[in-house]
Amino acid sequence: MIVAYAYTLTTARESSTTVLPILCLLLMREKRRPSVVTTLDTSWRKEPAILDGQVQSRERKYRREIVSFGRMLHQRGYVAATDGNLSVRLDEQRILATPTAMSKGALRPADMVIVDPAGRQVAGRRHVSSEISMHLLIYKLRPDVPGIVQVHPCTATGFAAAGMALNQPLVCEVVIGLGSIPLAKYGTPGTSELCESLEPLIPQYDAILMSNHGVVTYADTLHHAYVKMETVEHFARIALVTHCLGRQQPLGQQDLEKLLLERSKYEGHRSAMPLAATSRFPAGNLAGRQKVRPEPARQESKTES
Ligand SMILES: [Zn+2]
């Protein structure tokens, strides 16, 4: 612009005493004004640095969380030896997971591995678990889920090994937290067999018993996935006591419907599976196999609508 203006002035045959001061003024103004390019360059330099910092601090947090929940699962006896695996979805392309062949009670943040959605390891010194395929399937089918826990707690796995789902509405808190806990048919761990048996159940449930294997839970945080695992094992113990006592008194339909209404108020207890009626809990599963006869559903209050 300055050159064009100088050319115009020169061709207009203005005297040098007029042209030169104007040119100097224009050049000084041009120097003071920050160029658009400089402004853009600065923002581009800063933004990725801030994002990198946020990503790294999130990843560090999740590494520590996996260590912490791994230790809690080990202390509660939900895993033995090097059993079990936990994972967190960091973003659409990266899943942070426990490595193979390590006790969940002795993990360190640096032990974790990172895989892409196809299961290819992209970071970590250790090797990825063969059970990662189950985690990848859950992340694929449940975009709402960033945290998964897969372990073998004794009582719930006992039900899974006996071929029994935990699908009787016996305890109100469990109905609110998880609803029914189905049983997936057996599939060899680390193979497509297991994924095929889990696939139809994953969209509808937040906790699944795997026949002759263990339990998997998943939720909107790793913490809530861990909480659901505690609930499954606790409920399995209660169900076992009802078998020892030889009686079961499932909740009635009206009580279940009221629990469904309460469900949305409980943080971290939003199951994918709405369970409003006893019909959603298949009858006879426990009774048939264990010779325990469920009692009739509780009497509904006559004042209830
Ligand atoms: Zn397993």
Image (tube, helix red, strand yellow):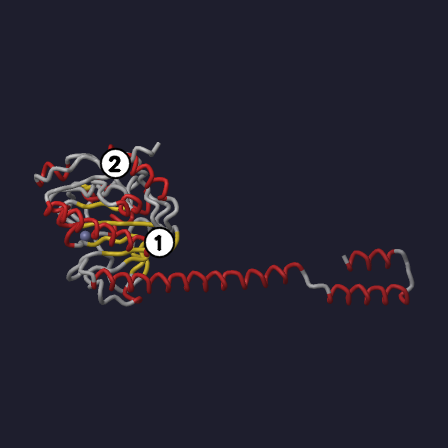
Disc 2: residue Cβ within 8 A of ligand 1's nearest atom: no
Distance between the alpha carbons at the discs numbered 2 and 1: 31 Å
Image quarter of residue 84: bottom left
Image location (x, y in percent) of residue 111: 27, 65
187 left or right of 111 in image: left
Above or below, comparing residue 226 to residue 243 in the picture:
below
Seen as rendered, the residue at the extreme front is: 303
Query: Tag 1: Cα neighbours inside 10 Å, few (<14), some, or many (≥20)?
Result: some
Above or below, comparing residue 76 to residue 284 in the picture:
below
Disc number for residue 252: 2
| Residue at (30% x, 63% y) in the render | 124
Query: Which of marks 1 and 2 precedes in the sequence?
Result: 1
Quadrant of the frame with the C terminus? top left
Q: Which of marks 2 and 1 is in front?
A: 2
Image location (x, y in percent) of residue 148: 29, 52
Above or below, comparing residue 86 to residue 254 in the picture:
below
Image quarter of residue 72: bottom left
Query: Tag 2: Cα neighbours inside 10 Å, few (<14), some, or many (≥20)?
Result: some
Tell me if I can see residue 197 in this picture: no
Tell me if I can see residue 152 in this picture: yes
Q: What residue type is labelled 2?
A: Gly
In the picture of the structure, the residue carrying the numbered disc 1 is 221
| Residue at (86% x, 67% y) in the render | 21
Disc 1: residue Cβ within 8 A of ligand 1's nearest atom: no
